Amino acid sequence: MQKRWVENPVDQSEVLAQLQQALQIDEVLARLLISRGIHSFEEAREFFRPELAHLHDPFLMQDMEKAVLRIEQALANDEKILVFGDYDVDGTTAVSLVYSFLHKLHPKVDFYIPDRYHEGYGISFQGIDYAETHGFSLIIALDCGIKSIDKVDYAHEKGIDFIICDHHLPGKELPKAVAVLDPKRSDCSYPFKELAGCGIGFKLIQAFAEKNNIPFEELEFYLDLVAVSIAADIVPINGENRVLAWHGMKRLNEKPCPGLDALMEIAGRKSSYTLSDAVFQLGPRINAAGRMADAKHAVKLLISHSKEEALEKARLIDMQNEERRGYDTDITEQALAIIQGNPELVNRKTTVVFNESWHKGVIGIVASRLTEMYYRPTVVLTQSNGVVAGSARSVVGFDLYEALSACSDLLEQFGGHKYAAGLTMRSENIAAFQERFEEVVSASITEELLIQEIKIDATLHLDQIDGKFFRILHQFEPHGPQNMSPIFLSKNVYTYGTATVVGGKHLKFKIRQDDSGYFDCIGFGLGDFCNALNSGKAFDVCYSIEENVWKDRRTVQLRIRDIRSLA
């Protein structure tokens, strides 16, 4: 697939020169810092050495005092508390964190995760009925609830109070809960707005601990869960999230909770996990529980007390993940066959595919895969509970939610954001939706947006990649939105030795530039370039720089993002 290379303009400002001098670093590294909003020595020190002392006062969050008082009241009155959360990684880590903390203080605490297929996302009437039947008088909802006005009213009628901890955008009206913790509330002055759901849960226990003289060190046990939620929920890795992610990944690598420790062992232990590893190795396995069976399995794993107990649960989740992968692969192949078998679908600016037998738990993953392959707004539909349910994904720069809004008369429900959404419709509306969605997208999307963009941070000569450069670059981690792994461009490089294809489609080779040393390179999915690279001609590459560890041997490796052969 053709990609569009976009180079950042070269910054030659006085601030750049001052920062480079103050830190005694390469100009390229100084430019990377400035692009992340870092302009001084002090800001750089805070970026490279995040401290837990930099976390904000949790009581700056609107309603935090009310939330803590209600929990204190529940403990004093020996009430039963139900910790309720979503079935994805953010929800299950949040539930595991808050449940584990409270259960140490109070035995009458339990947790509840709604069934993806029978209850759907968020607070459910079934969950409230469960709370009433089992005598719970307080529900703490995590990673959901900000728009559950009718559900909270229903609970109130039954004498059940709610504390809502959410990070999604509120509607015009807030639920009538005892406390609504959400930094995105218009009346909330909390300094950082982009916490994950598990991060809101962490702020709640931080506030409770502070009020009740519990040492902060006891909260550090939960930072690995917070880091995994930050990774999986793809929230910005700046501000407070960077502090939580940095310390959480340190804990994950040094002393993880038994559940995550077992999951890392099952996934294939690495010498050092990155945030990206948490996204691709741990996240899918935790998610698989809710996709294929019951997300309670994920919570039971994450609250395990011993490695032996955790390994047993991790093996079950790994089996569920293998099952998920099988469905994912099969459905992706079927969807590709539908598109490739119809020239009209191939040439559209959207993808809308439907099969009534596809597993609802994986259609979001399939939508993401089809978007990667065809790079256009995509909707994958299946039959579920008497309606057609779908998952939608977009391309960078195109507002999917707005496009679905223009099709709302054909939909029963839809929700989400700019790049991902869920929807339901009646089966008789599928064909009309397919045409309308194509019309709406075609009328508003530009040809440029249909070509995947690679943002290049800087042009490098390979000689610039020395030990000091790499050591400083390594300290930019953890990477994620607002702090992506930098991508560099090197021009007129040559293959050193012979390029080979490995794993059927991946490219393994070495490059050098002028009289530089050579660098090992890996290009995932770039096997088609093999012959061109072995022609002896110069070419341009864009890449990120990473550490490759093989049998305790550490080397610098370039992960190639794209190649341009020169005529």
Image (cartoon, helix red, strand yellow):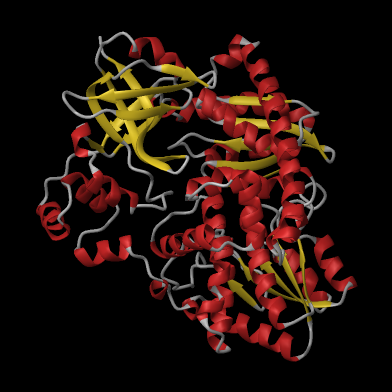
Residue beneath the point at 25% across and 45% down: 467
Count of all numbered marks drawn on residues in the image: 0
Up-down relation of residue 456 to residue 20 (above or below): above
Relative depth, front residue between 128 and 564? 564
38 with respect to 227 (left or right): left
Q: Which x, y percent locates residue 362?
A: 70, 37
Relative depth, front residue between 426 and 24? 24
Residue 176 seen in render: no
Q: Which x, y percent locates residue 492?
A: 21, 21
Up-down relation of residue 521 to residue 39 (above or below): above
Q: Which x, y percent locates residue 201?
A: 59, 69
Residue beneath the point at 66% across and 54% down: 262
State the image quarter where residue 70 is shown. Answer: bottom right
Residue 37 seen in render: yes
Residue beneath the point at 65% across and 61% down: 258
State the image quarter where residue 5 is shown. Answer: top left
